């Protein structure tokens, strides 16, 4: 099977989605294209409401904000599968679900079955032609993350070793560097990550910045401007619904 066709999947709180979340997809796609991969699309899978994170807005709002943010990034779509589960799901399971979903779509197309194209994540149809399908084409779901998420692999009790191994072995990682991080050093210091180094692509963000959802939430609660940090549509949604302490401000 060839693994040159990639769908990038990012998980996280997106509380709220920032411009850096969008940029992460753009620079990853650009980098992968230069390496000879075809990025067929991207997916954002916001984490479940039961994920223990301070000040986590309800997923109904996080999904709505992501949709607003993605108006500016049409090749990426939201997946609400994770938030619709009855409890929090590991990232490994999220990746596996989406991998299975794509495998089914590919085999349906190959068999000439009627496929509901509205189900396609992103520009799938545009980037895949019949010739590819006749060969051993496959779609590889890869986890797209910032270096802080990679480094969270080392937090005791947060990730199971088995899950980390399955994520790098079966799916692969695309890691975008973030201020204060050193993904290459982190990979070097981990036996599991070093073993599967070939499946980890590090994208260096040269124009590094410190945008984070935490800082955006803080600014919003203090009635400070968040223009150019999040999209105007996301900002309007937040204010309309009084999220993150913006009520009556
Ligand atoms: N400035 C950034 N540079 C690189 N990656 C980023 C950046 N901001 C977010 N990401 C990545 O986006 C994904 C989702 O992030 P998440 O929703 O946790 O945002 P966050 O800004 O880190 O949130 P919070 O501040 O609430 O912890 C993660 O993989 C995270 O590493
Ligand atoms: N064991 C696991 O699979 C595991 C552990 C910690 C975080 N996660 C995921 O990583 C993401 C982290 O998001 P935050 O950086 O916003 O906390 C979330 O989507 C969360 O579900 C997964």
Image (tube, rainbow, N blue to C red):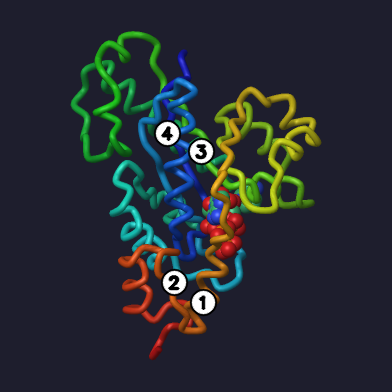
Q: In this view, does 127 lie above or below 20?
A: above
Residue 119 located left or right of residue 179: left
Label 4: few (<14), some (14–19) or many (≥20) C-alpha neighbours in 10 Å:
many
Residue 108 located left or right of residue 59: left
Q: Which of marks 2 and 4 is nearer the N terminus?
A: 4
Q: Quadrant of the C terminus?
A: bottom left
Q: In which quarter of the image is residue 227?
A: bottom left
**Circle 4 or circle 1, nearest the eye:** 1
Q: Earlier in the sequence, mark 1 or mark 3?
A: 3
Residue that label 4 marks: 7
Q: Earlier in the sequence, mark 4 or mark 1?
A: 4
Q: In which quarter of the image is residue 248?
A: bottom left
Q: Earlier in the sequence, mark 2 or mark 1?
A: 1
Judge by depth and name the residue closer to the eye, 36 or 67.
36
Q: Residue furthest bottom?
A: 248
Residue that label 3 marks: 95
Q: How far is mark 4 from mark 1, CA to CA? A: 33 Å
- Give how far across and how far down residue 34 sits, in percent: 46, 25
Residue that label 1 marks: 219
Residue 44 located left or right of residue 113: right
Disc 4, SS: strand
Label 1: few (<14), some (14–19) or many (≥20) C-alpha neighbours in 10 Å:
some
């Amino acid at each position: 099977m060839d693994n040159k066709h990639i769908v990038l999947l990012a998980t996280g709180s997106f509380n709220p989605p920032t411009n850096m979340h969008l940029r992460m997809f753009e620079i990853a796609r650009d980098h992968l294209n230069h390496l000879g991969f075809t990025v067929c699309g991207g997916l954002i899978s916001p984490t479940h409401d039961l994920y223990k994170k301070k000040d986590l807005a309800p997923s109904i709002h996080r999904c709505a904000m992501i949709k607003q943010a993605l108006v500016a990034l049409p090749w990426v779509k939201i997946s609400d599968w994770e938030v619709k589960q009855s409890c929090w799901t590991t990232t490994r399971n999220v990746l596996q679900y989406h991998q299975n979903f794509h495998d089914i779509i590919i085999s349906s197309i190959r068999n000439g079955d009627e496929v509901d194209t509205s189900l396609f994540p992103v520009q799938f149809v545009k980037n895949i032609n019949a010739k590819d399908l006749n060969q051993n084409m496959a779609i590889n779901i890869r986890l797209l993350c910032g270096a802080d998420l990679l480094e969270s692999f080392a937090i005791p009790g947060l990730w199971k070793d088995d899950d980390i191994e399955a994520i790098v072995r079966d799916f692969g990682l695309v890691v975008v560097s973030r201020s204060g991080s050193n993904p290459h050093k982190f990979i070097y210091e981990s036996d599991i990550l070093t073993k599967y180094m070939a499946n980890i692509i590090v994208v260096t963000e040269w124009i590094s910045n410190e945008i984070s959802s935490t800082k955006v939430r803080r600014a919003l609660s203090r009635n400070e401007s968040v223009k150019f940090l999040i999209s105007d549509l996301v900002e309007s949604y937040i204010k309309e619904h009084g999220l993150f302490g913006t009520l009556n401000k």
